[in-house]
Amino acid sequence: MIDVLYFAWLRERIGAPKERVETNAETVADLVTELAAKSDAHALAFSDMKSVRVAVDQELTDLDASLKDAREVAFFPPMTGG
């Protein structure tokens, strides 16, 4: 089991701030594929991964990151600073 967190417009599209999923995904990319297949809302949220950032156990990473021993994956839009 892994906790998946959604922020900003991802949360709005999916309709939930988080969910707990059972997965055999080995990488973040594998998890995205599984999540996108769950519903039309998930598919829409993950339709443009260029607009999505990811953190595994609160560390920024990329789609090739391993999920071995991961407890949490967070998806969020790019942040801007000022």
Image (cartoon, helix red, strand yellow):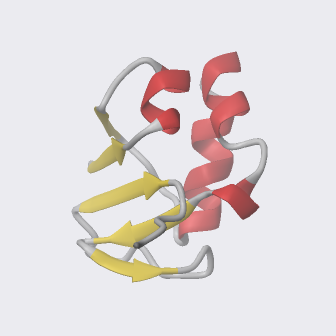
Say above or below: 15 vs 72: above
Residue 39 seen in the figure:
no
Q: Residue at x 36, y 56 (%)?
A: 74
Residue 50 seen in the figure:
yes
Q: Residue at x 44, y 49 (%)?
A: 23
Q: Nearer the viewer, residue 2 or 53?
A: 53
Q: Residue at x 60, y 58 (%)?
A: 52
> Is 53 left, or right, of 48 in this rendering?
left
Q: From the top left corner, tell me how far across and down residue 46 is, in percent.
A: 67, 43
Q: Which quadrant of the structure image shows residue 73?
A: bottom left
> Is 14 left, or right, of 59 in this rendering?
right
Q: Residue furthest front?
A: 82
Q: Residue at x 34, y 46 (%)?
A: 4
> Is 58 left, or right, of 11 in this rendering?
left
Counting labels gives 0
Q: From the top left corner, tell me how far across and down residue 7 is, in percent.
A: 38, 43
Q: Nearer the viewer, residue 31 or 17?
A: 17
Say above or below: 14 vs 25: above
Q: Quadrant of the C terminus?
A: bottom left
Q: From the top left corner, tell me how far across and down residue 65 is, in percent.
A: 51, 81
Say above or below: 8 vs 2: above
Q: From the top left corner, tell me how far across and down residue 33 is, in percent.
A: 68, 49
